[in-house]
Image (tube, rainbow, N blue to C red):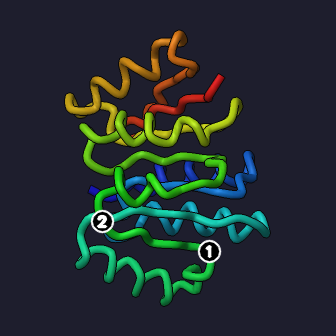
Amino acid sequence: MPISADGGKLLYNLIRATKPTCVVEFGTSYGISTLHLAAAVRDNGTGQVITTEMSRTKAASARTTFAATGLDDVITVLEGDALQTLAALREPVDFLFLDGWKDLCLPVLELLEPHIAPGTLVVADDVVLPSLGPYLDYVRDTANGYHSVTFPVDDGLEISCRL
């Protein structure tokens, strides 16, 4: 399930507006959302996209697409279990897009929280899926340090600002 065209446009605009240096994406798949993120990073003139994919086949296909579009120089693909590959991340995360397995969105967020500064946007796709429930409960509770809003595009995007 790739991101919709409108969802991709929203991601592009959010990246252009916030000008993050390090964008992290959980769940590359074939790289459709990554292209929107990377195009915005490129158009901002600075930054990188670090994306994760469990499937070696999907990662290879995404890399081919990234090279064909000329965006491969701003994208790093981490292959394997995101909870392992992202554990090595040491830099600040300036924008986080969660679109991998929905039951792993909360563990990925919790793993990266030490690297997420106040004001950082965290966006999750497919809010209509029941398996995203624990994540949504977490980010919708301001006691956990987020202010969230659901954006009604296709299956919904949850946009959360780290407080």
Q: Earlier in the sequence, mark 1 or mark 2?
A: 1
- Quadrant in the picture for residue 42: bottom right
- How many discs mark residues in the rendered view? 2
The three-letter amino acid code for the residue at tag 1 is: Val
- Quadrant in the picture for residue 129: top left
Disc 2 is placed on an element classified as loop
In the image: residue 42, left or right of residue 112:
right
Residue 131 on image: x %, y %: 21, 32
Q: Which mark is residue 74?
A: 1
Disc 1 is placed on an element classified as helix
Q: Looking at the image, is mark 1 or mark 2 nearer the viewer?
A: 2
Q: Residue at x 53, y 22 (%)?
A: 148
CB within 8 Å, label 1 to label 2: no
Which residue is labeled 2 in the image?
80
Residue 13 on image: x %, y %: 65, 50
Q: Residue at x 73, y 68 (%)?
A: 43
Q: Which mark is residue 24?
A: none
Q: Quadrant of the N terminus?
A: bottom left
Q: Against 21, is 78 above or below?
A: below
Q: Residue at x 44, y 55 (%)?
A: 86
In the image: residue 48, left or right of residue 150:
right
Residue 73 on image: x %, y %: 61, 81
The residue carrying pointer 1 sits among few (fewer than 14), some (14 to 19) or many (20 or more) residues within 10 Å by Cα, namely: some
The three-letter amino acid code for the residue at tag 2 is: Gly
The residue carrying pointer 2 sits among few (fewer than 14), some (14 to 19) or many (20 or more) residues within 10 Å by Cα, namely: some
Q: Residue at x 35, y 50 (%)?
A: 83
- Quadrant in the picture for residue 49: bottom right
Q: Against 69, is 106 above or below?
A: above
- Of residue 92 and residue 154, the one placed in the foreground of this image is 92
Q: Against 95, is 138 above or below?
A: above
Residue 114 on image: x %, y %: 58, 37
